[in-house]
Image: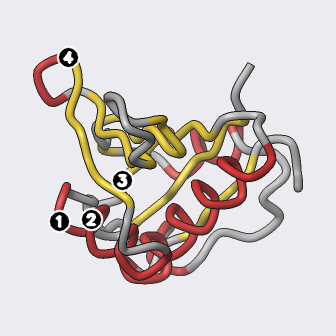
């Protein structure tokens, strides 16, 4: 079972943001798109199709900050951009349990989040 991550962002992430974040972590990482663009995966080239280190689902808009508080009770305080009525994006991401791949995937999603000025919440608290 993979580790779940939620990214909250004032701007929607796209494939370019993901590729740039991946390249800054490890220039050997690649990107593949699944299900007609519904999921982007950052992959480690392993001689085959690549092993996923991070899967990012399409961003969803959030209309109500109260919903974020309900769904992410571990987040004690939301950034001002999450509560000022500006557009807000919710992105679900997954990293594998495999330690090396998980560290790489987590580093990529954290880098992407930083570039977007967002907030990254790892569901298991690590």
Q: Secondary structure at mark 1?
A: helix
Instruction: Tell me, for residue 109, which label it has, or none.
Output: none
Nearer the observer: mark 2 or 3; the answer is: 2
The location of residue 85, given as percent across then percent down, is 35, 66
Are the two marked residues, 4 and 1, in contact with CB atoms closer than 8 angstroms? no
Judged from this view, the residue extending furthest toward the front is 47
Q: Can you say which quadrant of the picture contains the N terminus?
A: top right
The location of residue 33, given as percent across then percent down, is 20, 34
Residue at mark 4: 35
Between disc 4 and disc 1, whose residue precedes? 1
Between disc 2 and disc 3, whose residue precedes? 2
User: Mark 3 to mark 1: distance in Å?
Assistant: 16 Å
The image shows residue 90, relative to residue 36, as above or below, that is: below
Please tell me in which quadrant of the rendered image residue 123 appears: top right
Residue at mark 3: 89
Are the two marked residues, 2 and 3, in contact with CB atoms closer than 8 angstroms? no
Q: Local crowd at mark 2 within 10 Å, few (<14), some, or many (≥20)?
A: many
Q: Secondary structure at mark 4?
A: helix
Are the two marked residues, 4 and 3, in contact with CB atoms closer than 8 angstroms? no
Residue at position x 62%, y 40% from top? Answer: 95
Residue at mark 1: 16
Instruction: Tell me, for residue 19, which label it has, or none.
Output: 2
User: Mark 4 to mark 3: distance in Å?
Assistant: 21 Å
Residue at position x 61%, y 68% from top? Answer: 107
Pick whichever, 107 or 11, lies toward us: 107
Are the two marked residues, 3 and 1, in contact with CB atoms closer than 8 angstroms? no
Nearer the observer: mark 3 or 1; the answer is: 1
The image shows residue 60, relative to residue 99, as above or below, that is: above
């Amino acid at each position: 079972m993979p580790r779940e991550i939620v990214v909250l962002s004032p701007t929607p992430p796209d494939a370019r943001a993901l590729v740039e974040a991946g390249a800054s972590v490890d220039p050997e990482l690649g990107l593949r798109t699944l299900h007609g663009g519904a999921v982007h995966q950052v992959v480690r080239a392993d001689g085959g199709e690549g092993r996923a280190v991070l899967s990012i689902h399409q961003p969803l808009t959030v209309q109500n900050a109260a919903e974020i508080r309900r769904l992410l009770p571990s987040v004690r305080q939301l950034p001002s951009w999450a509560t000022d009525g500006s557009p807000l994006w919710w992105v679900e991401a997954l990293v594998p349990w495999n330690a090396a791949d998980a560290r790489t995937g987590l580093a990529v999603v954290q880098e992407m989040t930083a570039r977007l000025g967002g907030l990254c919440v790892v569901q298991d608290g690590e």
